[in-house]
Image (tube, grey):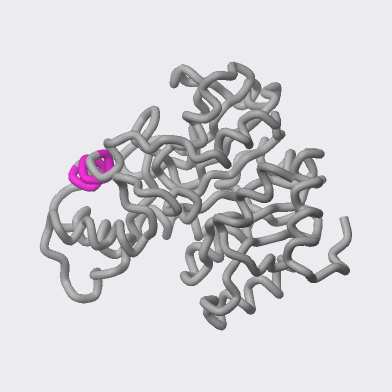
Amino acid sequence: MTTTLMDPQSLLGEAAAALRAGELVPYLGPGVSALGAQPVPLSPETLADWFGTKIALPKRARGNAWAAAQHIESYKHRNTVTALMAEAFATPVEPSPLHSYLATLALPLIVDSWYAAEMRQALAARDDWIEVQGITRAGIGEDRWFRFYRPDGSDADAASAGNAATVLYTPHGSVIPARNFLISDADYVEVLTEIDIQTPIPEVVRDRRRTKSFLFLGCRFNDQLLRSYARQITKRSIDPHFAVVDMETLTRNERVFLEERNITPIDMPLAQALDSLITA
């Protein structure tokens, strides 16, 4: 792939062709779902606000989903955090046209970085995929960072994932099938202590990304945690990557991150970009 053409539409055409060829890994953020009227929180900020409607939060936790969850975990119980997350994402979110389109491509790897499980639902008509979810280690008494699930929600294993046509990776967990959520500061402290040496990243993900690039859709990197995850998930993949973004709204840290990771920005409205990807 080349990125000499900086015209957004040309870059998008290049990305669309690479996606169809299985050369790009879609990395989906909540912005994809936020294009429609959905019944669940669709950003860390709106999730933090939702927590605030359930439990009074100190000033330092307002607007920060991870700090809000940590406050609830510290002063209530981890089970309260899990129950609130399950409530927040209880109403199923219909897969968008993009999710449905991606499910037809039999891609080796798809990353879904939000909790609402649309990509899992879009894949439901197929039986040749496995999901691997990040899990909290709080109170489980196991030396595990993730779990594998079959399309019917039953437990799978690494061997099954290695043989699957598609691996769906949900690094922060998901409401379906088992209410696994990485959400509190404590959850992420554990992961971030080892993520640089890749222990929390499933081997099947590390293997499948090795010859791929990434396409970020509906993602923001305006928080250090989100940048850390994207950096480590894309580690040892191949350049260049692409991201559909609105350059006018990017923070300085986001711009630096795109340059650091050799992510080529496709500067156009997300809805327009997704329509073009599907119809290209």
Identify the image quadrant of the C terminus: top right
Viewer-proximal residue among 48 and 207: 48
Relative placement, left or right, of 202 versus 178 is right
Q: Quick one: 253 or 218, which is closer to the camera?
A: 218
| Magenta-span inclusion, residue 84 | yes
x, y percentage for residue 92? 34, 34
The residue lying at 78 percent from left, 69 percent from top is 7
Vertical position of residue 182 compared to residue 164: above or below = below
**Occupied quadrant, residue 243:** bottom right
- Quadrant containing the N terminus is bottom right
Q: Is residue 14 left or right of residue 267?
A: right
In which quarter of the view is residue 164 placed?
top right
Q: Is residue 210 visible?
A: no
Image point (74%, 40%), residue name: 207
Q: Residue furthest bottom?
A: 252
Q: Which residue lies at the image location 70% right of the left edge and 29% below the top edge? A: 106
Q: Position of residue 159 (x, y in %)?
A: 65, 22
> Magenta stretch: dominant SS?
helix
What residue range appears in magenta?
80-86
Q: Is residue 187 visible?
A: yes
Q: Indicate the position of residue 18 as horizontal and vertical percent values.
A: 80, 46
Residue 59 within the magenta-colored segment of the rendering: no
Q: Is residue 178 left or right of residue 88?
A: right
Residue at figure coordinates x 59%, y 58% from the top left: 230
Q: How many marks?
A: 0
Is 247 situated left or right of 8 in this image? Answer: left
